[in-house]
Image (cartoon, rainbow, N blue to C red):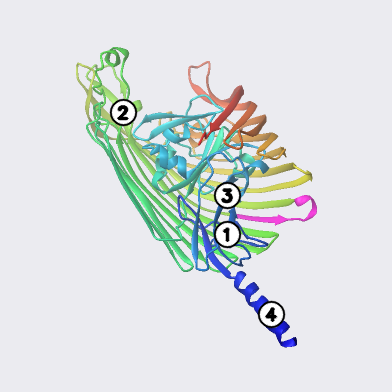
Amino acid sequence: MKQFYSTLFLLLISIIAYSQHTIEGRVLDAQTREALPGVSVQAGANGCLTNAQGRFVLQATADSLKITYVGYNTRKVPAGSGFTDILMEPSSTKLNEVIVSSNRIGQLRTDAPIAISTISKQMLNETKATSLEQVLNKVSGVYMVDLGNEQHTMAIRQPIGYKSLFLYLEDGIPIRTTGDFNHNALIEINMAALKTIEVIRGPASSLYGSEAVGGAVNFITASPSQTPMVKAQVESSNWGYRRADVTASSTMGKFGILIGGYYANQQNGYMDHSDFRKLALTLKTDYQISGKTKWTNGISLIDYKTDQTGGLDSTHFFNKDFRNFHTFSYRAVKAFRWKSSLEHTWNANNFTSFNVFFRSSEIGQNPFYAIRSTSNPLKARGEINSDAFKSYGMVLQHKKHFNWKNASLIAGLSADFSPATYYAIYIDVDKNAAGFFTGFTKKDSVLTDYNVDLLNTAAYLQADAELLPGLKVVAALRYDRMDYDFNNHLPPSAFTGAPDEQNFFHSWTPKVGATYNFGNDRGVYANYSVGFAPPNISELYRGVKVPTLQPATYHNYEAGGWFGFASNKGYLDLSIYRMNGTNEIISVRLDDGSSENQNAGKTTHTGVEWNLRYAPG
């Protein structure tokens, strides 16, 4: 009898050991094949979270696995005994998506008291956009104006204009330096290498600093896929547009690499003198030094040139006569960016990231808008100019989590030194009797020749705590100082610019907000934030006089909410805002007929933004 019980006991142990077989696998994004860390994998009573490479190992006590992750559709798969890759499809209706632009670290959208929208990889793939406004204009409250051949200007909580009231970022780093804004800056983005786009509407200066007034647009590049992947596509139109995209990516052990880009070419369009070409390339590498440390490097290269079409008068437009009065105007952009990021998780409560970056950008042009008529009907005047800068910068950030009230504190330092130059020469333009500008001759006359050393240093803090179940409060404060060292290489005049000058500006920008999450994808938020925009180089130093200018300041009040419905098949995202601008810089005509820039503008911006999404199947 004793031998019988021993045999039975060993048999039960064998059955239990067999039923609790080890399962290994990897959880990946179905769209990009990127690893998904922190995914919940449940097998009966046992469960675990995936690591930084998306991998998991657990003892299964059931015949299936349940995989759940914020922003993705829940999956159930058989619990096989071999290694398996599990692909997760992003949810098109879930509100609990993960965002990074609110505090530079991944968090739930429902914890961020701001108006923010995400353009997913799925939406980018489905839209097949040839220019960015075709996807950005899907965001409520955003109107990106198409000026042709990827040229553009922006309107987010602002009228259509050309002022430095929007901040454009790539992986959290501004693509241009403070004080040298260009409304065509998004020419420098590689659309083929994007994973997602996050759009913050309203001031984001408490985290990102100056110029983030109307909004901040963060272009997040794709990371290397865990499995080998190659994607290629070509497209063509009957108006002479051609484009080819290629992306290749893989991970080998701890090292991952992604190469992606596109070449676009437009010839013989419906309008004369409207050709353009663009080459965009991105190289990104990830090296997982250890389970707690990751090193990422990224390089972006843009080479772009376009004809400038100018405009048509009403008679030509009505008669569908699309001949161009300008036959030689152009814009050329050369941009290079490098960013290196080191991320380290000290423990469950401490995380540090350190970023260094280099940027080089040059916009050269023979602009149509600079061509002016003279007293001779067969002559005009114009200019060829070049605006360029190089940047050397860093951003250091640390996040500390506290057990009390699920609170956290984020502290950061940043510095950006950017020497900038501007050079313009005079051209003598030929004009025929029909009004067409047919050619030009370069002259020895230099109109503008200066350099400016720009230095932006900043420090910021952001704290949040869950004071009550579902109620999270966020407070942030940032201090910025901008130093301008202007050196004019020509005698000061109305054309050449101001005398040599040194100026500095500084600003404190706070933000206070709260969210209340009712659960079931429903919640509300409210915030008060301040944004500021320092004078641009052109506002400060064009012309002889150097007035005493202060940064324009904007006080923003907003409230909104998110509301899931129809069993999470749809949702409504709503925001209401009022923003008051003071000390806005405008050109004031003086008694002697001259003009100078002054802080004399005051504006009020109010609006309602809503986004309704529904997926019936």
Q: Earlier in the sequence, mark 4 or mark 1?
A: 4
Q: Is residue 149 above or below residue 122?
A: above
Q: Which residue is mark 2?
A: 382
Q: What's the CA distance linking mark 2 and mark 1?
A: 72 Å
Q: Are marks 2 and 3 in contact (CB under 8 Å)?
A: no
- Mark 1 belongs to which amino acid? Ser
Q: In which quarter of the view is residue 479 placed? A: top right
Q: Residues within 10 Å of mark 4 (few under 14, many from 20)?
A: few
Q: Is residue 404 magenta?
A: yes
Closer-to-camera residue (611/426): 611
Q: Secondary structure at mark 1?
A: strand
Q: Which residue is mark 1?
A: 64
Q: Nearer the viewer, mark 2 or mark 1?
A: 1
Q: Earlier in the sequence, mark 2 or mark 4?
A: 4
Q: Earlier in the sequence, mark 2 or mark 3?
A: 3
Q: Nearer the viewer, mark 2 or mark 3?
A: 3
Q: Which residue is mark 3?
A: 74
Q: Earlier in the sequence, mark 4 or mark 3?
A: 4
Q: Residues within 10 Å of mark 2 (few under 14, many from 20)?
A: many
Question: Where does residue 548 sit, x and y in percent of width and height?
Answer: 59, 31
Q: Nearer the viewer, mark 4 or mark 3?
A: 4
- Mark 4 belongs to which amino acid? Leu
